[in-house]
Amino acid sequence: MSLPFVWISLSFIFGIILSKYFHPTLFLIFLIASICGISLFICKRKKPIFLILIALTGAFACRSSLSYPSGNIANFSPASNIHITATIIKPPIEKSTSRGKKAVLILRAEKVEESKVGGLFRATIHTPHQSYLYGDRLLLKGKLYRPYNFGEFDYKKYLASRRIYCLFSAKGRNVEKLSSGGNLFFSFLFHFRTVLLNSIDKNLSPQKAVLLKAILLGERSGISPQLKKIFIDTGTIHILSISGLHIGIIVSIFLLFFKFLRLPYKTNYLLAIILIILYAFLSGARVPVVRATIIAVVILAGRLLNRPSAIYNSLGFAAFLILAVQPLYLFDVGFQLSFLCVFFIVYLTPKIEKIFFKEKILRSKKINLKKILSFAIRSLSASLAVWLGIFPLLSYYFNNFTPITVLANLIVVPLLFFVVAGGFSFILFTPIPAVSPFLGIIEGFLLALLVKAVSFFSNLPFAHFHFSLTLLGMITCYFFLFLFTLLNNPPMADCREVAFNGVKRKFSRSLHFAKKRKR
């Protein structure tokens, strides 16, 4: 079976979709699984049966994730003035609103009143009287309630995909800190993160500091709605949250640095894997970061094992690994966009390059012109591939159409590389007073240039407009996209060419041996 993890992942996804929308009973799932298990020992063709078993596993995993155990805090009825003992498991998020400050915490429950419980919940502390850290054990008094949806946004599903089924609200004076603890490694890492955030605030202006914290550490709480809007209108909002693009840039920076040190290439990939995992935790280990990190680690591990060409298999393995932990991530927009971006870069970019590349460019005697044009065409092809691949999905979910994204990314993505590289240099040399002001000026200039570029593209005519696709419209767009690529790059033609070359080689060998025998 070629590309085994692609087929395994697709089968698992099919099972999740089947369970989500058709609600098969557990008895039916186990009955079909038992029949398939017996068939494995009887039938000769085992691969289809094996894939059916994987699909049934996906269906069972989805059913399991839609429910929670009896000891979960979500089993308690909504109530006011309830006492909960819990531990903070992620770095808190502090926000400033028109009503004052608030802290958003993700906690693991230990007790509700006197009853022992488990499970996660999201707490909002209004006007906190102190700062909260990862590992703090708290006693909270407030209101426990169920999540509710905001308009078209399914907030309940969003939280359920993160195994959070209830919310909690309390005032700062009703929160008591019992003790500090948590894993020592994570406590050190999150403390270092706080130091970095404070360093950025200290050395940059507020607007630039907010932007750099969002780009480098995923801290988006201070971004103004006006600034966020210009990024949305140009389709470049992805640079304000750590995603696959950021992870790819950071991996490139690490690999370039290790190459400069002349380290063996396997050592380069191994160190890059370790550092990118540390960076994922440093940036808060939020779901999009973890997702992008898993994809990057799988691809780097493939290169480490001298298997860089199996990119589709690496993507399939990453998807299977993520969905095995939480099947409901399949219905998360971020999950879908992450994998679609990587898939269409790999799948569409070479096909678009064939359209753009001309023989005159390839045969040009001017080497510098040839390199510049080749780089420009490859960059444009990658940008266009991503836009074509995700615009139906963006239009379906967000009712927005941004054709300017193709051009904007040609400027914004290279700028982002320099912003990230400059940000790391700035943070690294912050303790050195003679160097940090100079690097701060450079980083501030790059951030200002980034905002100016995005603002310029957002103000162009027809840069963005409202456009909504239905589910059928989205499926139709993808159908015609794949149909167009198949018609322009027919796989049968490739197969015929391969087959013809194989026959030609066999004929040449036969002719060679026949001549030898005559001699």
Image (tube, grey):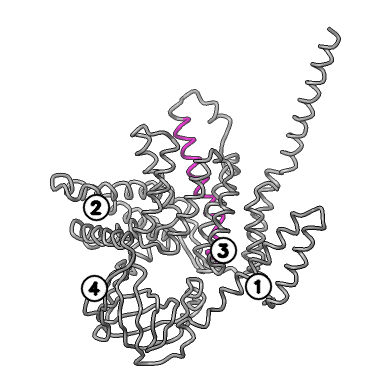
Relative to 282, residue 357 above or below? above
Of the two numbered discs 4 and 2 on the same chain, state the one appearing first in sequence: 4
Label annotation for residue 460: none
Relative to 477, residue 441 above or below? above
**Viewport quadrant of the C terminus:** top right
Query: Bounds of the magenta span?
Result: 370-395
Q: Give the amino acid type for the residue marked by disc 4 in the picture.
A: Ser
How far apart are the two marked residues, 2 and 3, measured between alpha carbons? 42 Å
How far apart are the two marked residues, 4 and 3, measured between alpha carbons? 35 Å
Asked if the residue at tag 1 contacts the one at tag 2, i.e. Cβ–Cβ closer than 8 Å, the answer is: no
Label annotation for residue 444: 2
User: Within 10 angstroms of label 2, few (less than 14), some, or many (20 or more) residues?
Assistant: many
Give the residue pinned by disc 1.
19
Q: Percent x, y for residue 259?
A: 38, 35
- Name the element at disc 4: loop
Q: Give the amino acid type for the residue marked by disc 1 in the picture.
A: Ser
- Name the element at disc 2: helix
Of the two numbered discs 2 and 1 on the same chain, state the one appearing first in sequence: 1
Label annotation for residue 131: 4
Q: Percent x, y for residue 169?
A: 35, 84
Q: Give the amino acid type for the residue marked by disc 3 in the picture.
A: Ala
Q: Quadrant of residue 318?
A: bottom right
Give the residue pinned by disc 3.
324
Relative to 440, residue 504 above or below? above
Of the two numbered discs 1 and 3 on the same chain, state the one appearing first in sequence: 1
- Name the element at disc 3: helix
Of the two numbered discs 4 and 3 on the same chain, state the one appearing first in sequence: 4
Q: Percent x, y for residue 339?
A: 54, 56
